Image: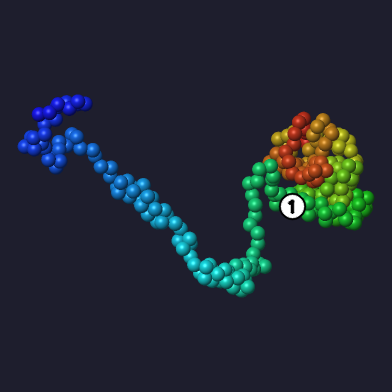
């Protein structure tokens, strides 16, 4: 045994020394595992990136050129054009908010107003001078009145080219030879009858004498309403009563 001036005693006896291969594991320095780290950090992401590439990324320039040529061929042949037969009708659009559809009755009214606007037939005076129906019949009154449903409204008018309320009743009754004044209040002074005795062909006077129409039965009347409606069918309103003429 020798003493070291700088450290503990060192046993130089070869019999007491420990071979390097038998050095305790506690004193061995671990070796870093570089290969697994390289595989996880570089190789694996590279494989995923390769798989994720879209197929067109590997298309060659020749393939891309061929596709462009095919597209031009289709365009030249109008392969993307569509011919629509002339007989095809556009679909009707319904249910749009803020808009309404035109009813068949309104279309008929507009057509009737257009036809009657150029009326050139007999006047009230002509009809009274030569009535086409010389005998009064309530059903005849209704039949005549219905012929002018949809005719336009014109204040002071007494022909199918334009009626007001009393002008309409005056024109209709002139067909059976009955002369009525062109005034709703004056027509309202004819013989009043009880509501339960009213029948189709009687006059209906409404608004305290301010309006008049022809009763159709079932609580309805035909009358020249307003410029917006023309001659139409509706129910009497307000304070109204029935008047019978021709008796």
Number of marks in the image? Answer: 1
In which quarter of the view is residue 216 placed?
top right
Q: Quadrant of the N terminus?
A: top left
Outermost residue toward the left in this view: 15
| Residue 99, image x, y percentages | 69, 44
Q: Residue at x 89, y 38 (%)?
A: 183
Q: Quadrant of the C terminus?
A: top right
In this figure, which residue is indicated by the disc labeled 1?
107
Residue 75, placed above or below residue 199 = below
Label 1: few (<14), some (14–19) or many (≥20) C-alpha neighbours in 10 Å: few
Q: Residue at x 88, y 55 (%)?
A: 118
Residue situated in front as seen by the camera: 240 or 156: 156
Is disc 1 placed on a helix, strand or loop? helix
Visible residue check, residue 74: no
| Residue 26, image x, y percentages | 18, 34
Left or right: residue 210 compared with residue 28: right
| Residue 20, image x, y percentages | 15, 41
Left or right: residue 33 compared with residue 170: left
Visible residue check, residue 216: yes
| Residue 55, image x, y percentages | 45, 61
Left or right: residue 12 compared with residue 51: left
Q: Residue at x 76, y 31 (%)?
A: 238
């Amino acid at each position: 045994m020798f003493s070291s001036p700088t450290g503990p005693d060192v046993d130089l006896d070869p019999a007491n020394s420990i071979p390097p291969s038998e050095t305790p594991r506690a004193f061995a320095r671990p070796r870093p595992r570089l290969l697994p780290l390289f595989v996880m950090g570089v190789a694996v992401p590279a494989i995923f990136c390769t798989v994720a590439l879209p197929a067109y990324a590997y298309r060659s320039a020749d393939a891309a050129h061929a596709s462009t040529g095919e597209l031009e061929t289709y365009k030249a042949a109008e392969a993307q054009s569509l011919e629509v037969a002339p007989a095809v009708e556009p679909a009707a659009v319904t249910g749009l908010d803020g808009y309404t559809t035109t009813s068949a009755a309104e279309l008929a009214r507009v057509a009737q107003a257009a036809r009657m606007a150029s009326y050139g037939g007999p006047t009230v005076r002509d009809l009274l001078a030569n009535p086409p129906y010389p005998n009064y019949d309530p059903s005849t009154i209704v039949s005549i009145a219905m012929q002018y449903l949809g005719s336009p409204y014109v204040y002071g008018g007494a022909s199918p080219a334009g009626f007001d309320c009393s002008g309409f009743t005056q024109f209709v009754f002139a067909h059976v030879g009955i002369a009525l004044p062109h005034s709703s209040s004056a027509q309202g002074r004819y013989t009043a009858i009880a509501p339960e005795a009213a029948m189709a062909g009687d006059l209906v006077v409404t608004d305290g004498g301010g309006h008049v129409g022809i009763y159709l039965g079932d609580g309805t009347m035909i009358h020249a309403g307003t410029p917006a409606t023309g001659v139409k069918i509706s129910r009497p309103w307000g304070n109204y009563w029935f008047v019978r003429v021709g008796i």
